[in-house]
Image (spheres, rainbow, N blue to C red):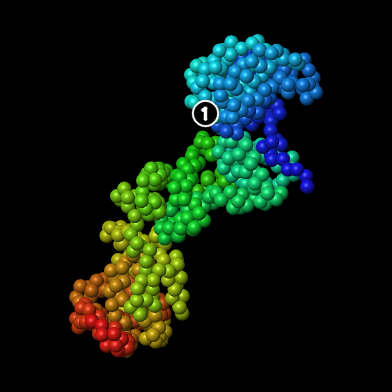
Amino acid sequence: MEHFIVSARKYRPQVFEDVVGQQAITNTLENAIKNNHLAQALLFTGPRGVGKTSCARILAKKINQQGFKNLDEEDFAFNIFELDAASNNSVDDIRSLTDQVRIPPQTGKYKVYIIDEVHMLSQSAFNAFLKTLEEPPAHAIFILATTEKHKIIPTILSRCQIFDFKRIGVLDAKNYLKVICEKEKITAEDDALHIIAQKADGAMRDALSIFDRVVSFSGKNLTREAVTENLNVLDYETYFSMTELLLENKIPEVLNSFNTILGKGFEGHHFINGLASHFRDLLVAKDKQTISLLEVGDNAKKKYLQQAIKASIPFLLKAIEKANDCDLKYRASKNQRLLTELTLMQIASINFDGEKKKTANYIIPATFFQVLSPKKINKQKVLEITEPKAILEDSKPKIEIPVLKNIKRRTSSLSLKNVHDKKIEKKISTEENFDSHPKDTFTELKLQEIWKEYVTILNEKGERSIASIVATDIPKLKENYTIAFSVPNKLMQEQLKKSKPKLLKFLREKLNNYGIKINIILNETIEKKFAYTPQEKFNKLKEKNPLLDKLRITFELDM
């Protein structure tokens, strides 16, 4: 089996042109060599995996290249000395180094000493190195490399020319991965390479290590799904779908989606930080001048632009504020999941009910996500939560959770819609001649089905008060298509009379019979049917199931 070489070693830069994302530093070093303006001590500092050691090695070769056409044929390696300060950090190691510095090079012009992880030197070693670093021989150049510049003593820093290496940008890392894919004959989606570059967090070596791992997992074809699965990262699709739910005020679906994310092993802190970043990207996508700040692939950029249209700037600003507040409180919270869930519910309630004034931590009440199902009304059971969008059929009525945008606010009595409704009511109430209208026959069972359907529609519209009145009794079909309906008190009778025209219009259209009339009967004895005390409730249940009394006697239970 052929020996495998990791990409970080196989594609290590050999010339300055191959170094990714550090053009300013490489151009400065090349000009310094060309103009013979190179300092005797250089300090390369920056995060891991950004090219510090690679640039030091390239510079060490480049210094002695003048006058030779082919660099590889020359023995410049004898002029380059690498010292790992992590394992050679004593005074004796530095004294040995200073002794070697005095000897001039046998080939080439300079001897180059690369000291990696220089911050690991002890205090005594630093002091022993000071004089040599300040006044080295003319043939010696020192290149120090470190990831932690703040640990180096000031007297060393003042003797060095400092080069600060920056983190490699996501686009630069992605483009370099594309070049490697072409050389290795690997097909990769743009979004897949973008996720790898993001995961590397500015370190090219980390990006290459992740690239090798993903290739081992998915072979010669890298897809976005395979990369996210292998790296166990939250795909941007997760944030897009979550934001859609938040914009539509769908709190139950938001909580279920968050539970799924937690089930995949992600922390709530990681998720809420990613969501805040997603809101920031949507805010950036609002303006054409700032779109360039989006460090995402072309496909993802289109999705950001589409969703940015749906999300208003006030919503995004408040959402970012709440997400950041959750981030600050997360570590100190004893119930971190609850904190995140409350934050999500508050974000989902930001744009609910338009511009209506709400408290800072307002959450949509749970009652807005529940409706009465006809089956539950018949059996007097608990409320049933169903699917969105009401589907009305003549044979079998089905109900689903009302979409929140259908919940209406109270309208002014002076509104055009209110005036129009009153005209319809007046027209229906004054219309007495039905000779030219159809009068299809129908059964009392059919009437009761349509009646329940009307109750459901009222609940979906948010007219729960009148819906409860219409559901208090079961309508009875009398002669000449007259419907008898009883209510327990005068207040209900008056309210039902006001809504009678709409109810009458609905029944006539549904049953295709314009001879229908409704007779509202005041029957105060109905109130006595309601059970209030435990004894009355038990007697009510016993009427439906006599075995309950036997159960009570068997186990000697109290009421």
- Compared to residue 17, the image places residue 207 above or below, namely below
Report the residue at 62% width, 30% height from top: 51
* Circle 1: element type: loop
Circle 1 is placed at which residue position?
148
- Compared to residue 300, the image places residue 543 above or below, namely below
Image spot of residue 424 (x, y percent): 33, 68
Image spot of residue 178 (x, y percent): 68, 40
In the image: residue 301, left or right of residue 255:
right
Quadrant in which the C terminus appears: bottom left
- Compared to residue 358, the image places residue 418 above or below, namely below
Report the residue at 28% width, 69% height from top: 465
Image spot of residue 96 (x, y percent): 62, 19
Of 83 and 415, which appears nearest the observer?
A: 83
Q: Residues within 10 Å of mark 1 (few under 14, many from 20)?
A: some
In the image: residue 191, left or right of residue 257:
right
Q: Furthest residue to the front?
A: 92
Image spot of residue 398 (x, y percent): 44, 73
Locate residue 535: give its quadrant: bottom left
Q: Does residue 386 show up?
A: yes
* Amino acid type, mark 1: Glu
In the image: residue 114, left or right of residue 234:
right
In the image: residue 382, left or right of residue 37:
left
Locate residue 526: give its quadrant: bottom left
Of 55 and 261, which appears nearest the observer?
A: 55
Report the residue at 34% width, 76% height from top: 381
Of 319 and 534, which appears nearest the observer?
A: 534
Report the residue at 72% width, 15% height from top: 105
